[in-house]
Amino acid sequence: MSNNTLLEISDLSVCYGRVTAVRNVSLTVGSGEIVAILGANGAGKTTLLNAISGILAPQSGSILYAGKQITGMKPWALSRIGLSHVPEGREIFPGMTVEANLKLIDVDGGGSKFSIDDVLAMFPRLAERFDQMAGGLSGGEQQMLAIGRGLMASPKLVLFDEPSLGLSPMLSKTVLSAIRRLKERGISSLLVEQNMRAALKIADRGYVLRIGRITAEGSAREMIESPDIQRAYLGL
Ligand SMILES: Nc1ncnc2c1ncn2[C@@H]1O[C@H](COP(=O)(O)OP(=O)(O)O)[C@@H](O)[C@H]1O
Ligand SMILES: [Mg+2]
């Protein structure tokens, strides 16, 4: 593993009963890198992220984070060492205010520090909604809040599960450019997306996941330009 590697996954398989949803997946995320995982609905993207963040136990394989074997560690323990997960479905507390949702996070992952003011500067819409119940926010605002919550843990690496799903093109852009700004603060991202073009615009590298397997990988530029990858991807 190179000095620069923050996350190194080797030969990871994850099953639901007898169904293998992620099969022999190997990938790396370098320090300060944005890595995209691209794949259609059902490809195994969420399963992969859930295995990394400790929500699911893998069948086999290893996950090294900052040089440490984290396979089998619990989500709360991982967030304490800077591995933050912004799950699919924007898990926020609908009956609590925006402020309370942000203040709930009492973890310091040791990465770039984020205060509530930093989060509000990144997403000014949340400042306007600060005292409102999270459940009354629009989909885009809930996504911003979910990301803000992830950042309150001062992460080194954030796992994003389809952050642009269901958002208008303009809000998707806001969310994806926020992820790019995290990179400027030294935060790495593993970004799962169905929207290949949008993800590759901000990513350094990417992998294509197809029915649980990595079928292609490369620099974002190579992937955008490769007809093979586009065909393989669009053929899903
Ligand atoms: N809780 C579950 N139980 C059984 N099968 C599941 C479960 N969650 C997902 N799957 C299956 O695993 C595969 C990958 O799903 P998922 O990781 O959610 O894909 P993606 O996030 O890429 O859409 C799909 O075939 C899906 O039906
Ligand atoms: Mg998913």
Image: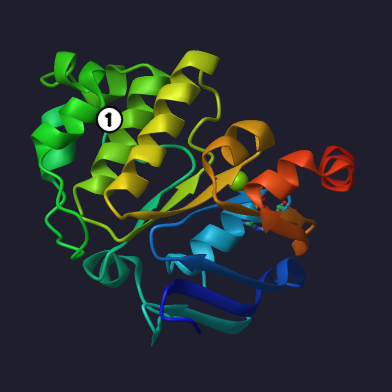
Residue 102 horizontal/vertical position (percent): 16, 39
Q: Is residue 156 above or below residue 235?
A: below
Q: Kindly state the secondary structure of the residue where label 1 is placed.
A: loop
Residue 19, quarter of the rendered image: bottom right
Residue 96 horizontal/vertical position (percent): 17, 31
Q: Is residue 20 left or right of residue 181?
A: right
**At x 26% / y 38%, what residue is drawn?**
148
Q: Quadrant of the C terminus?
A: top right
Residue 141 horizontal/vertical position (percent): 33, 22
Q: Is residue 20 left or right of residue 200?
A: right
Q: Please state which of residues 218 and 116 is positioned toward the viewer in this rendering.
A: 218
Any part of residue 197 in sight: yes
Q: Is residue 108 left or right of residue 211?
A: left
Residue position for label 1: 94
Q: Please state which of residues 95 and 153 is positioned toward the viewer in this rendering.
A: 153
Residue 72, quarter of the rendered image: bottom left
Q: How many marks?
A: 1
**At x 10% / y 20%, what residue is drawn?**
131
Q: Amino acid at mark 1?
A: Pro
Q: Is residue 84 above or below residue 198?
A: below
Any part of residue 58 in sight: no
Residue 80 horizontal/vertical position (percent): 22, 68
